[in-house]
Amino acid sequence: MSEPLSIDVIVIGAGAVGENVAGRVVERGLSAVLVESDLVGGECSYWACMPSKALLRPGTVLSAARGVAGAREAVTGALDPQQVLERRTSFTSDWDDSSQEEWVTSTGIILERGWATLTGEREVTISHDDGSGTTYRATHAVVLATGSTPTVPPIDGLADLDYWTTREATSAKEVPASLAVLGGGVAGVELAQAYARLGAEVTVIARSGILGNYPKEASDLVLDALRGEGLTVLTDTATNAVTREDGRFVLDVGDGRTVTAEKLLVSTGRHPNTAGLGLESVGLDPKTLTRDDTGRVPDAGGWLYAVGDAGGVVQLTHQGKYEARVTGDAIAARARGDLGESAADWSAYASTADRAAVPQVVFTDPEIAMVGRTLEQARKDGVNASETSLEIAVAGSALHSDGYTGWAQMVVDEDRKVLVGVTFAGPEVSEMLHAATIAIVGEVPLDRLWHAVPAYPTVSEVWLRLLEKYGL
């Protein structure tokens, strides 16, 4: 076997997160190789964030037009499913990653196509399609940016069937007549609404409620909207077994009830995609991998890092890209001798926002936009927290659409008098989220936040109403 090729940093996984790590270390003067067995650009570009939002957006626009008198009278037709699917495909470049590959190579990053396996400390062997292999040895770091993979529940009969995961749902070539969605999380609920608005008869089956990580007042607004649009949403419902009969999926949901659909989408969560990487060869268990705020895996001796979904902290593309920037800078700083074992909170080398200020959006109609902690999470973390909430009923919301329905909440650390969590629910509230993120990250005191005057008439006037209700 030939000697391993020497490189400063090896990044396994060329999704959005891996691209950002590799790009960052190269900008800082290090060399990097990026290894990918699938499409460069990863899950978000081709099967998740971008195509799913492209499927949702036309229905949201149509609903918004119908929500304003004068505009609704001009709406004479329904969505054109084929046009929606074609527009979705345009955002994936028809699942062609050549432009992404061009970007990678233009930055000076080496791109290797193949399957990467850790074969020793700092050592990665790549198996190529033609049967050949290439081995690299990293001078400074190996970074796992391998994303996540669907978690499939142990339901009788499911493993033997050809069901959809989010990949198949976001890349489908036609709209099924009926769709059963197993799971009430973000991806399942978003795709359920998208396909219902495209004409499918949709049933959502959730073991508990839907969108359980969000305040109930917010998730209830989405639940009411889904049911109001004709979706069947079965909450607190277990799926006991799945079979195929006459070309259709039949789900046993207990008490003699069944759900029958042409297609079945299983969207019951995801877990880090760390199996099969050879972690055992360096004494690590793929199922218990942990990372610190710099991205480094503490048990590996200082050379192994994990970012994005592979790190198991936050499964959101934007947060993974943030971790990638932090980790890339930390690797470069350690290569220069400028950073030791740990990094200070909120420094350039620590992903502190993962613990305190994660922004997240459910792109249903209405939307849920949340950053930081819920009241329950804050109190569990030992924060002396209070909450202030109200319906969104301001001049801006009344102008936005007839019958606007929304809800807002802020969670306050009463000892420091700063925000630790904010949630908005309502049409297009995602565009208000970054202001809340800045307030939390900046730890803006409430008495100073009072002087941030919202423009009139906008939906952002809800900030004023929240602070007034709080007592300012």
Image (cartoon, helix red, strand yellow):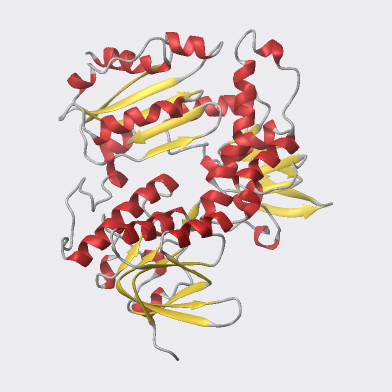
Q: Residue at x 36, y 24 (%)?
A: 409
Give the vertical position of 122 relative to 466 (above or below): below
Q: Is residue 165 visible?
A: no
Q: Residue at x 43, y 57 (%)?
A: 19
From the top left corner, tell me how far across and down residue 84 is, in percent.
69, 36
From the top left corner, tell me how far across and down residue 278 is, in percent.
43, 76
Q: Residue furthest bottom?
A: 1
- Front position in the image: 248 or 259: 248
Q: Is residue 322 visible?
A: yes
Q: Residue at x 46, y 53 (%)?
A: 16
Answer with left or right where residue 371 lies relative to residue 367: left
Answer with left or right where residue 209 lies relative to residue 19: right
Answer with left or right where residue 292 lies relative to residue 53: left
From the top left corner, tell me how far across and down residue 353 is, in percent.
29, 44
The number of numbered discs placed on residues in the rendered structure image is: 0
In the rendered image, the quadrant that contains the C terminus is: top left
Q: Residue furthest right?
A: 246
- Front position in the image: 38 or 306: 38
Residue 372 picture quarter: top left
From the top left corner, tell me how far across and down residue 23 is, in percent.
38, 57
In the rendered image, the quadrant that contains the N terminus is: bottom left
Residue 130 picture quarter: bottom right
